[in-house]
Image (cartoon, rainbow, N blue to C red):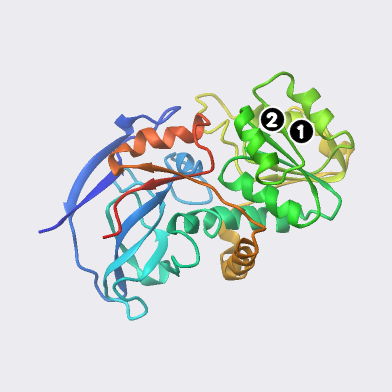
Amino acid sequence: MRTNTQVRLVRRPVGEPSRDDFEIASSPLSAPGPGQVLVKVLYVSLDPAMRGWMNEGRSYIEPVPLGEVMRALGAGRVVASGDPAFSVGDYVTGLTGVQEYALVEGHELTKVDPDLAPLPAFLHVLGMTGMTAYFGLLEVGRPKEGETVVVSAAAGAVGSVVGQIAKLKGCRVVGIAGGRKKCDYLVQELGFDAAVDYKQGNLKSALRAACPDGVDVFFDNVGGDILDTVLTRLRLHARVVICGAISQYNNTEPVKGPSNYLSLLVNRARMEGMVVFDYRDRFAQAVAEMAGWMAAGKLRHREHIVHGLETFPERLLMLFRGENFGKLVLAVARDD
């Protein structure tokens, strides 16, 4: 009988996750029943949100149960199908989990066309990451032409897309990133107007120089000190989009809240959280527009591919150490 190698969550992390929080295990590979599809997982998306999924407690999604396959978005190829909507050889994305094969209900999968873009792009700019950037900026941030948009973790998966969409909408865009190489990438390759290296010097003064007239929209992926600093630069009726807080996810102490929150009052500004699943009924519309921008050369994407299912625990930590450059994707298997 064929077996399926899986990465299972066996302990809830305290602080930064470690290899001991997971186990690499094998289980028998089952044939799909009616309405089910068996997918050979080729790529798995590594996302900061995964850290939150490991925690017990109330959130926008149930925590991963201990002993179960670690939750993850994946892309792969159908190898057996009990759903007439899917044929062997179809390429799909969905919540596959971190494993070699995934048995998934057909209605939870989305067909994708690898001739349109490389398969990892469907876990990035044409996938959940791209949808997060699209709806978070356009529906929550609501940028207007000529406004200044600031993005934290701007060289990352979500931030890099947010900044490019803001430029397409006629905004002035400033990215916050760590390191000269990432900042140069934002300006020279993605077309940002300016980039601030938070690892160098005084962030507050650097942000003041980059945004002399203040900030109209702040798209935050980091939280902590960076959020607190940008709050001091808000303009009247600014909008702050809370997409993530990667600086806080591994805290063993309470989450650090913004001490400069009164800037929201003074500037009659708005701070709002967003979860991409709230917009799932409009994903097709967003993908079509994003694909059009890509085809026209107006939207670029960069995936950072790492390899090996067994390396998942260490590769996930790259996100929290700023070691990835672009969307971090784990290659699980070859497409053969």
Camera sees residue 179: yes
Look at the picture and state if 195 lies above or below 87.
above
Q: Which mark is residue 230?
A: 1
The quadrant holding residue 286 is bottom right
Element marked by disc 1: helix
**Which class describes the residues within 10 Å of circle 2: few (<14), some (14-19), or many (20+)?**
many
Q: State the residue lying farthest toward the bottom.
A: 84
Q: State the residue lying farthest toward the left.
A: 1
Instruction: Name which residue type carries label 1.
Output: Val
Looking at the figure, which quarter contains the C terminus? bottom left
Look at the picture and state if 167 lies above or below 260.
below
Q: Report whether 22 appears left or right of 131.
A: left
The residue positioned 74% from the left and 27% from the top of the image is 259
Mark 2 → mark 1, Cα distance in angstroms: 6 Å
Element marked by disc 2: helix
Camera sees residue 273: no
Look at the picture and state if 108 lies above or below 149.
below
Residue to which mark 2 is pinned: 226
The residue positioned 44% from the left and 28% from the top of the image is 16
Q: How many marks?
A: 2
CB atoms at circles 2 and 1 under 8 Å apart?
yes
Looking at the figure, which quarter contains the N terminus? bottom left
Instruction: Name which residue type carries label 2.
Output: Ile
Residue 101 in the image, given as x and y percentages of width and height: 27, 57
Residue 263 in the image, given as x and y percentages of width and height: 83, 34
Depth check: give the residue in front, 168 or 1.
168
